Amino acid sequence: NTIPILTIDGPSGVGKGTVARIVAQKQNWNLLDSGAIYRAFALTVDARKIDISNEEALEKIAQTIDLEFKTKLGNELVSVYLNGKDVSNILRTEKIGGMASKIASIGMVRATLLKWQKDFAKAPGLVADGRDMGTTVFPNALFKVYLTASADERANRRLRQMQMQGSKGIISQILAKVKVRDKHDSLRKYSPLKPAKDALIIDTTKLSIDEVITQVVALIEA
Ligand code: C5P
């Protein structure tokens, strides 16, 4: 497999999505937002009122999920379609994020979604962001990055993002949620959040998006 792949992993709210989108756009590569898959899964479970301990029902969803990403090259926005309906905005809510984190700890769900994610590796290249892109989904990727930032900084970024979208947030509550999600994602048994051994670790606490992108692009072009 000679398709160049860049994996970007890290905790929630670190800016992976933004960095992945801009780098994919610069390189003209495909993009995989793996978090959106787990979120769409959570949305389906929520809509059908399925109990997340019902593994059989979850497996059925994993096998039949009708999910489509519409990315236009040269367009920064990625729309997510679930059963033909644009769900991009609903997917980004905290409620769905929290549910996604719970569902993502189920080994069977991760195993079923694995092949689906691998299929995104298409010419001329792929930028994949998530928690286990460099460790589990694309262990042979040519380029691996792991982004971190303090929990306080990530909560602040989320607050600013919410404010830009016109909604209010309370910093202490956001920080508490960030910490819960960190704990869930790093302590789980299957594909816990951790840097791949060969990943470049970038602490973005004091860096701007542009500074992070410069480092990531330098890695690809080196
Ligand atoms: O990145 P995002 O916040 O959209 O992901 C939502 C949740 O999906 C995460 O908290 C994590 O539990 C899960 N996830 C995962 N593996 C990935 C991407 C996301 O477990 N590769």
Image: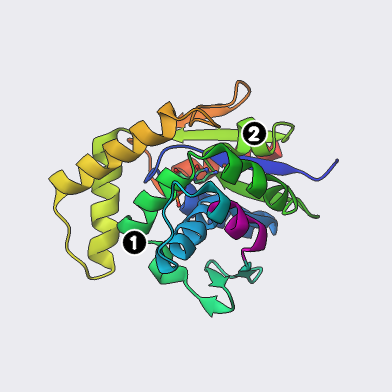
Q: Amino acid at mark 2?
A: Thr
At 44% from the left and 46% from the top, the residue drawn is 53
Q: Which mark is residue 5?
A: none
Horizontally, residue 173 falls left or right of residue 186, namely: left
Q: Is mark 2 within 8 Å of ligand 1?
A: no
Q: Which mark is residue 136?
A: 2
Q: Classify residue 57 by image quadrant.
A: bottom right
Q: Amino acid at mark 1?
A: Thr
Q: What residue span does the magenta drawing correspond to?
A: 58-65
The image shows residue 188, relative to residue 98, as above or below, that is above
Furthest residue to the right?
Answer: 1
Answer whether residue 60 is magenta in the image: yes
Q: Is mark 1 within 8 Å of ligand 1?
A: no
Crowding around mark 1 (Cα neighbors within 10 Å: few <14, some 14 to 19, many 20+) is few
Q: Quadrant of the N terminus?
A: top right
At 48% from the left and 38% from the top, the residue drawn is 105
Q: Say whether residue 99 is visible.
A: yes
Answer whether residue 196 is magenta in the image: no
Q: Position of residue 145 (x, y in %)?
A: 57, 34
The residue that mark 1 highlights is: 93
Q: Classify residue 42 by image quadrant.
A: bottom left
Q: Nearer the viewer, residue 123 or 70?
A: 70
Q: Quadrant of the C terminus?
A: top right
Horizontally, residue 49 falls left or right of residue 171, namely: right
At 45% from the left and 67% from the top, the residue drawn is 48
SS assignment for the magenta stretch, majority: helix
Q: Nearer the viewer, residue 75 or 12?
A: 12
Q: Position of residue 115 (x, y in %)?
A: 73, 47
Q: Position of residue 67 (x, y in %)?
A: 61, 66
Q: Earlier in the sequence, mark 1 or mark 2?
A: 1
Q: Classify residue 162 by image quadrant.
A: bottom left
Q: Say whether residue 15 is visible.
A: no
